[in-house]
Image: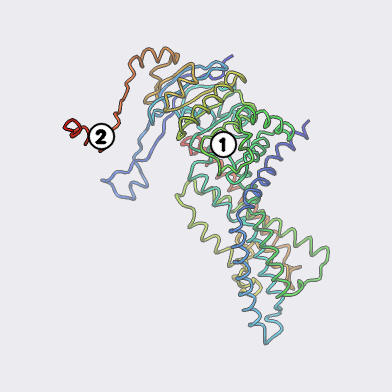
Amino acid sequence: MGLKSSLLKLRKYWVAGKISARDSSSNHATIFSNCCGIAVTLITLFSVYHFAFAARPSIQGVTLSMALWSIGMYTVYWSTGVRNIYRDIALDVKNGSVEGILNKPVDYIVLSVCKRLGRQTWVCISTLTISATILFLMAGAPPVGFSFIWLIEFLSLGFFGFLLSLISFSLIGITSFWLDDPEPVMWIFDKSVMILGGSIVPVVFFPDWLKLLATWLPMGAMISFARAFTNDFATQFPTLLLSQLIWCVVMLSLAIFSWQRAKKILSIYGG
Amino acid sequence: MTAIIVENLVKTFSLAIRQPTQGRLRNFLRPEKEVITAVDNISFTVPEGQAVAFIGPNGAGKSTTIKMLTGILYPTSGEMTVAGLHPYKNRRELAFRIGTLFGQRSQLVPNLPVRDSFELFGAIYELSPATVRRRQKELIGLFDLAEFVDRPVRKLSLGQRMRAEIAVALIHKPEIIFLDEPTIGLDIVAKKSLREVLGRINREEGVTLFLTSHDVGDIEALCTRTMVVNHGRIVVDESTDALKKDYFAHRPVKMVAVEPSLEEIIQDIYGAKK
């Protein structure tokens, strides 16, 4: 009985994600434009790197393949659409829908996250297919020896990075209870993620001080799994994981605290 | 049994007022506050199975009262129980026993057939898939949804959508349903159809209805009791029939004559001469 009711409690979030995926499957234009956008970006960027590496096999010990696979990982992160959670929450706060969900037996933040992930399913599948194809065609096979340890390290950085992103972008969404428009906060955070995550220039090419920021700031820690394709990954892994864990705890505490305050505002002033 | 008990309920909002005579910084750091009393010491009880209208002008405190009764807003003072539970303290438990419908806010999934919204809300209320299917079948019959249940919500007429909204809000068999302006924007035919189904769930399923509306037709058709609220206070609380007798003894009838056509006017002027 206890197990059955626990499963039914969790099932609602799964169904919300599934229905949102179904709901967004008709958005062919969005799926198509995302695929085109990612294809153009990757082909342009990879062509620039091909040109830069044309005369030499490596720059500071980094091969072309390593650089391209590092950049490609940012595409994986981007295609999950995790950053859009902030917009969903901000919109619900602005139009007052959030108070309508409060009288349902659900956790609003978890529901929003599941709906966003569901809504992103088709965009994610299509953009990942496109970017993986371009990556294999222009960068070749991944420049790593696939060992079990490497895979575990890569997946754990990917998992905690994804978790950190979910929490951080939800937190930015929650700020819309206090800010009229959280867009400026999001803009700064998002651009920092782009730079420190190595979306254009891989972290391995950064000067030491910037590499330090990319390691220890949450914006860089979200995408530290992209650094799995460099030679010094094994030695860096513990530091990268520690940074992610610290930020997960900090951001989660902040998100819980802010959500409690936001619920208080809602219960006093309404949506 | 009593479905709703409200005792001395008060809700005040404190709003920052910008003083034009003072600077921006002072307004920001030390804003002057104005306290607005949205609900002012109201008390009432609603027995199980009753259909109650809670009416009044805009800003009278109707929606604020509904939000407090459904656990969205916390009252400034006073006590209340809904289905034997404190709405704010037991919000989660209460959610399983009440249904809400805000006429101006859709709960349905826009691009998908109504059936998917049944699935979503069934899961939210922790019903098993088999229970959802059974209940969905009942509601499709009760609300006459068969004709459009497989059509995407965005392609439904407003009347069809509202019927679907109410059906979905009833998926978990709530004991009380709060309806905030359910017929807003509907044409006469759609209003009539919606009133019929609401009346049926009240009579046949014994669901308590707590309704706010600006449409006297909704109240006459559905509610046996009417509370009139103004400036946050209940000014009238009596049976709808008595209210009709006391306040609607004289019904103003507006008559509009059909304007004669140009041809008729000319005939009128010159016809006699001919």
User: Does residue A100 sit above or below B80 in this rendering?
Assistant: below
Q: Is residue A43 left or right of residue B241?
A: right
User: Does residue B234 sit above or below A28 in this rendering?
Assistant: above
Q: CA distance from mark 1 to mark 2?
A: 63 Å
Q: Secondary structure at mark 1?
A: helix
Q: Is residue B269 left or right of residue A224?
A: left
The percent coordinates of residue B102 (x first, y second) are 51, 34
Identify the residue at image location x=56%, y=36%.
A102
Identify the residue at image location x=64%, y=26%.
B173
Q: Chain of mark 1?
A: A
Q: Is residue A72 left or right of residue B269?
A: right
Quadrant in the picture for residue A153: bottom right
Q: Assess disc 2: are there few (<14), some (14-19) or many (≥20) residues with their C-alpha within 10 Å of its C-alpha.
A: few
**Circle 1 sits on which residue?**
A102
* Most distant residue in the right direction: A148
Tag 2: residue type?
Glu
**Circle 2 sits on which residue?**
B264
Front residue (pair A155, A127)? A127
Front residue (pair B130, A55)? B130
The percent coordinates of residue B134 (x first, y second) are 71, 30
Front residue (pair A173, B161)? B161
Q: Chain of mark 2?
A: B
The reply to whether residue B180 is in sight is: no
The percent coordinates of residue A162 (x first, y second) are 67, 56
Tag 1: residue type?
Leu
